[in-house]
Image: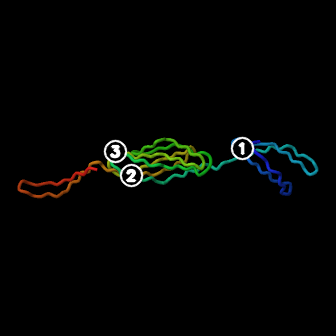
Amino acid sequence: LHGALSELRPLGDNRATIIYQNDGAAPAAGDRFTYLVQTSSNRVSSPAEVRILVEEPPPRLQAPARIDFDPIIAGDSQTRDLAITNSGGGVLEGRLTVSAPWRLRTSEYRVESGQTANIAVTFQPEEGREFIGQVTLGGSDGAVHNVVLEGSARLPIDWHRRRSTSRRREGRTRHERLRLW
């Protein structure tokens, strides 16, 4: 026995309540003990084995629906945290995958009940454009949760052409503008 039993509290009609309290010395997954009842006429019942099975609620994943990254220059990087919370019981665990140009610091997660794990997600584009991707959390129970990722990058050199020309005696002049970030 890894706990204590309260006194018997009669409820009438040959029913009673006893409260079991785990002492914390052993895991609270379950316990068992033998119990005898003595009547007021000093008769004793046959021993009965009582088995206690503690069932935790299942793990429950909480994560954001999306993570937005600020605009950056292609070739640079920016990191945001993906917060994974287990608001249920037990242990929440699984694998992580991400689409390019994002990277993850780890490919697995494990979160105890009531805890939050922060996973670093890095946006590192090599070209200038808008990007939409996702992180997929695949739970060990087969559940899948997707987090949308969005970011944009611009090239470090931006070349703009103006279509204006001017006529001079020597010929036409074309105007172009080069911008460095």
Indicate which disc, 3 or 2, sits on the residue closer to the N terminus: 3
Crowd rating for badge 3 (residues with CA inside 10 Å; few <14, some 14–19, many 20+)? some
Q: How is the image coloured?
A: rainbow
Indicate which disc, 2 or 1, sits on the residue closer to the N terminus: 1
In percent of width and height, residue 66 lies at: 46, 53
Image position of 17 (left or right of 107): right
User: Which residue is labeled 1 in the image?
Assistant: 30
Disc 3 + disc 1, Cβ < 8 Å? no
In percent of width and height, residue 144 lies at: 52, 48
Image position of 140 (left or right of 169): right
Q: Nearer the viewer, residue 141 or 120?
A: 120
Helix, strand or loop for disc 2: strand
User: Which residue is labeled 3 in the image?
Assistant: 75
Crowd rating for badge 1 (residues with CA inside 10 Å; few <14, some 14–19, many 20+)? some
- Give the foreground label among 3 and 2: 3
Q: Nearer the viewer, residue 74 or 130?
A: 74
Q: Does 73 sit above or below residue 166?
A: above
Tag 1: amino acid: Gly
> Furthest residue to the right?
41
Helix, strand or loop for disc 3: loop
- Name the residue located 16 percent from the left edge and 58 percent from the top edge: 164
User: Which residue is labeled 2 in the image?
Assistant: 151
How many dots with numbers? 3
- Name the residue located 23 percent from the left edge and 53 percent from the top edge: 160
Tag 3: amino acid: Gly
Disc 2 + disc 1, Cβ < 8 Å? no
- Name the residue located 15 percent from the left edge and 54 percent from the top edge: 174
Helix, strand or loop for disc 1: strand
What is the CA distance from the residue labelled 2 to the residue labelled 1?
49 Å
Tag 2: amino acid: Gly
Disc 3 + disc 2, Cβ < 8 Å? no
Instruction: Tell me the quarter of the picture where residue 75 sits.
Output: top left
